[in-house]
């Protein structure tokens, strides 16, 4: 199978599961539910949940074991974009070439939709679609919830956003840029691979190996973003140097996969996809 067929197959599973877990637009409070669905179903690439499902499969797990967590990661990503677009943060009227959530539904509904998406994410992490049961599974789900909470909170994504906000009107140096990237964007991408491996029943070594793959891929993702926007790394180091850095990270990410052999082909291809993405 090639990466694009793999991506469409996984995205279909993820979108169906997201549709099942999100509250119906027909139910009250309907405006809030519409805003939540708008934020989630507006053309995202689903990189984080795909990483979680792929990492689950690489350690020998079955997709249903990681599907609720995969949804949780996309819900957290969606909430972060809704809040990031608000006037008090990045103040963006458009997201994925559509009106941003607060432009379409109003500011207070967008704030609440973000809050509800984040809360729903942890509800998903505590739920389970797989057929297995027992204490081992419970322990893995608890570990997974802790991993995601750390990655999404003050020591992860929210912390990165806070430092980014501090530097809105001043130029960060390279180590500050690195901090922002590894926390604001990198942490959620890295934990996606980690959590997928954890829920798929990977050994501690396998889980940490895939976490490393996720960390390299997370920084890679953001450096490519900088290159596309001519910001951050690209502004500070120049596009060619930033591209060299991105290529080195893609190589490091793929090197983490060596012990898994051919069955990690999709994670290898995903690192190349992130390196070569144009949007
Ligand atoms: C508001 C707490 C809080 C956090 C916001 C991630 C983030 C933190 C803000 C996003 C700012 C931004 C646009 C950064 C550039 C990199 C990035 C995360 C792009 C969007 O991710 P994709 O490309 O999005 O995976 P899609 O649209 O595919 O879902």
Image (tube, rainbow, N blue to C red):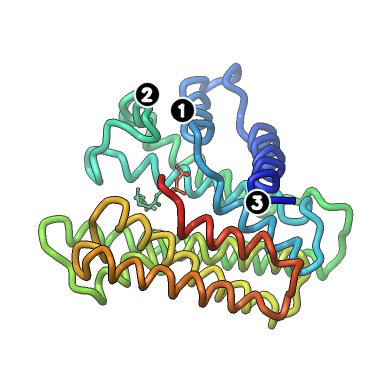
Placement of 121 over or under 60, stated as above or below: above
Determine whether the residue tagged by mark 1 lies in a helix, strand or loop.
helix
Residue 35: which disc? 1
Dot 3: few (<14), some (14–19), or many (≥20) neighbours within 10 Å?
some
**Badge 3 residue CB within 8 Å of ligand 1:** no
**Badge 2 residue CB within 8 Å of ligand 1:** no
Q: Do residues under tags 3 and 1 come within 8 Å of each other at their CB atoms?
A: no
Q: In this rendering, would 33 be left or right of 55?
A: left
In the picture as drawn, the residue positioned furthest to the bottom comes out as: 205
Give the mark nearest the N terminus, 2 or 1: 1
Q: CA distance from mark 2 to mark 3?
A: 36 Å
The residue shown at (79%, 48%) is: 129
Q: Nearer the viewer, mark 2 or mark 3?
A: 3
Q: Do residues under tags 2 and 1 come within 8 Å of each other at their CB atoms?
A: yes
In the picture as drawn, the residue positioned furthest to the top comes out as: 26
Q: CA distance from mark 3 to mark 1?
A: 31 Å
Q: Position of residue 47 (x, y in %)?
A: 55, 51
Q: CA distance from mark 2 to mark 1?
A: 6 Å
**Badge 1 residue CB within 8 Å of ligand 1:** no
Which residue bears the numbered disc 2? 105
Q: In this rendering, would 166 be left or right of 142?
A: left
Query: Observer-nearest residue: 197 or 132?
Result: 197
Determine whether the residue tagged by mark 2 lies in a helix, strand or loop.
helix
Q: Quadrant of the C terminus?
A: top left
Which residue bears the numbered disc 3? 3
Q: Position of residue 189 (x, y in %)?
A: 51, 61
Query: Observer-nearest residue: 277 or 177?
Result: 277
Tell me the quarter of the picture where residue 79 sits: top left
Determine whether the residue tagged by mark 3 lies in a helix, strand or loop.
helix
Query: Observer-nearest residue: 247 or 223?
Result: 247
The residue shown at (65%, 53%) is: 69
């Amino acid at each position: 199978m090639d990466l694009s067929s793999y991506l469409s197959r996984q995205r279909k599973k993820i979108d169906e599961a997201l549709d099942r877990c999100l509250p119906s637009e027909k139910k009250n409070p309907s405006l809030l539910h519409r805003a939540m669905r708008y934020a989630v179903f507006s053309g995202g690439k689903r990189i984080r949940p795909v990483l979680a499902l792929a990492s689950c499969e690489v350690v020998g797990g079955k997709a249903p074991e990681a599907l609720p967590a995969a949804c949780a990661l996309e819900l957290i990503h969606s909430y972060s974009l809704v809040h990031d677009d608000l006037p008090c943060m990045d103040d963006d009227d458009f997201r994925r070439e559509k009106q941003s959530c607060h432009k379409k539904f109003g500011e207070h509904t967008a704030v609440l939709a973000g809050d509800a998406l984040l809360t729903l994410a942890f509800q998903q992490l505590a739920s389970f679609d797989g057929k297995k049961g027992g204490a081992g599974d419970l322990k893995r789900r608890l570990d997974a919830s802790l991993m995601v909470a750390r990655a999404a909170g003050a020591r992860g994504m929210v912390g990165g956003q806070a430092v980014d906000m501090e530097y809105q009107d001043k130029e960060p140096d390279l180590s500050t840029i690195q901090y922002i990237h590894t926390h604001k964007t990198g942490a959620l991408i890295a934990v996606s691979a980690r959590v997928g491996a954890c829920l798929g029943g990977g050994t501690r070594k396998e889980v940490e190996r895939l976490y490393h793959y996720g960390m390299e891929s997370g920084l890679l993702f953001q450096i490519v973003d900088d290159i596309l926007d001519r910001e951050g790394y690209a502004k500070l180091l120049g596009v060619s140097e930033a591209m060299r850095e991105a290529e080195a990270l893609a190589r490091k990410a793929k090197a983490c996969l060596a012990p898994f052999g051919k069955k990690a082909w999709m994670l290898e291809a995903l690192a190349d996809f992130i390196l070569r993405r144009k949007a």
